[in-house]
Amino acid sequence: MSIVPPQDRPSPRSRLPMLDRYVLRQLLAALVATTGGLAALIWLTQSLHFVSLVVERGLSLRVFVELTSMLVPSFVAVILPITTFVVVQFVYQRLAGDRELTVMRAAGLSPFFIARPGLLCAGLSVASCMVLNLWIVPMSFHAFKQYEFQIRNRMAAFLLQEGVFTPVSDTMTVYVRSRDHDGTLHGILVEDDRQPDNPSTILAERGVMLVVGEQPRVVLFDGSRQEIDRRTGRLNVLTFDRNTIDLTSGHGDQARYRDAAEMSLRELLHPDPRVVAPRDRGKFAVEAWRRLTAPFTAFSFAMIGLVSVLRGAFSRHGNIIRPAVAIMSVVGLLALSLLVQNLAGRNIALVPLMWIEAILPGLICAALLFVPELRQRGASGPDARGAGPLPAEPARP
């Protein structure tokens, strides 16, 4: 009979890379599938708000998909911390239900090494959210607002249909009897209400579409302009051989003021006083700090899921209380995040609470999960390796 020498036994550390890949592969696959599916569902529900815009403007399906797909990065940035918690909770609960965690613990793996794939997954989520919040989401939302502005104020003017009253804006409707292959319009009627006190009706035999300074305009030939004088009630008729009409909504110089969500981090922290009013600087600052703090909620949510599974005694029949407490904790943190952001928007001095709310729960959970292990290492002496001893192997003949 012989006993395998200790130096010939495979150490727990030699098996860790394989275990990491095994668990991390499941976490990342579930994270991509869950985040993608939930983002697609949100995209489907939110895109319904733009159906009326597409129908009224007569836009194609391609334009509709292009417009609404620009909102997908913002959806992913919001739901990624939540799906990270869901995936970590689900995968580790499944490992516990299949007794795989029991085997890992019996092999001498400490809670830190078991939780390491979950921490790597959380780290990837934090990095992804940071990239989304600081670069991708502002650029995609800016492109979305620009595209929507063009559709509402410019593109619709080029989609005039024969024999249809087309509302090119909220204050202008255009009717075209026919259109030639070269773009010449015939039988044009324009109802112009851009000046509420002086509405007018314009008739023309023919016209041509042009773009001047990125604004759609139509040049009318052989027509008349009819207006009603509100003071006298008389109809004034002005005939013309040639006239040019701007087919935009006519609100000022058609300038579009950018939203805080499409500004860069530098613009939010140092806003242009000519564009941002002093009373709104606090809201812009809160938006900037939200982009910096929100990614760390993925780490806190993942740690809540790890603590709910790895801390405490293992139950053969399962334990529904700890997952329920973890879910309620995440819901409470989401509500607290909205409350803190609202308070910080009113008082900029409360911005540090946003950092505390985002990071502190994860640090508390890390202390609950890993501090007992550190204390055990200290009690075991300097030779402790962080992994318990392997079970003795049976003697071999």
Image (cartoon, rainbow, N blue to C red):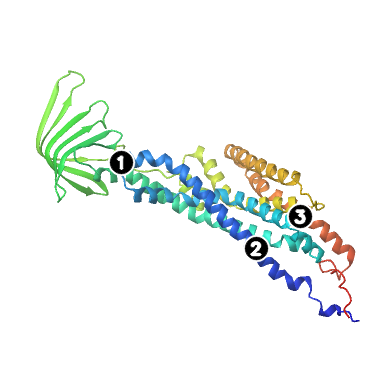
Q: Residue furthest top?
A: 232
Earlier residue among tags 2 and 3: 2
Asked whether residue 181 is in view, the answer is yes
Number of residues whose C-alpha sits closer than 10 Å to that of mark 3, classed few (under 14), some (14–19) or many (20 or more): some
Q: Which residue is mark 3?
A: 310
The image quarter containing residue 224 is top left
Where's residue 368, x and y in %? 78, 52
The amino acid on which the numbered mark 1 sits, given as a three-letter code, is Arg
Q: Secondary structure under badge 2?
A: helix
Asked whether residue 253 is in view, the answer is no
Q: Secondary structure under badge 1?
A: helix
Q: Which residue is mark 1?
A: 57
Q: Which residue is mark 2?
A: 24
Cβ–Cβ below 8 Å for labels 2 and 1?
no
The amino acid on which the numbered mark 2 sits, given as a three-letter code, is Leu
Q: Nearer the viewer, mark 2 or mark 1?
A: 2
In the displayed structure, does residue 362 sit left or right of residue 211? right
Residue at 37% from the left image edge and 45% from the top image edge: 148
Q: Secondary structure under badge 3?
A: helix
The amino acid on which the numbered mark 3 sits, given as a three-letter code, is Leu
Q: Distance from label 2 to label 1 (Cα)?
A: 47 Å
Where's residue 65, x and y in %? 39, 50
In the displayed structure, does residue 221 sit left or right of residue 84? left
Residue at 48% from the left image edge and 45% from the top image edge: 260
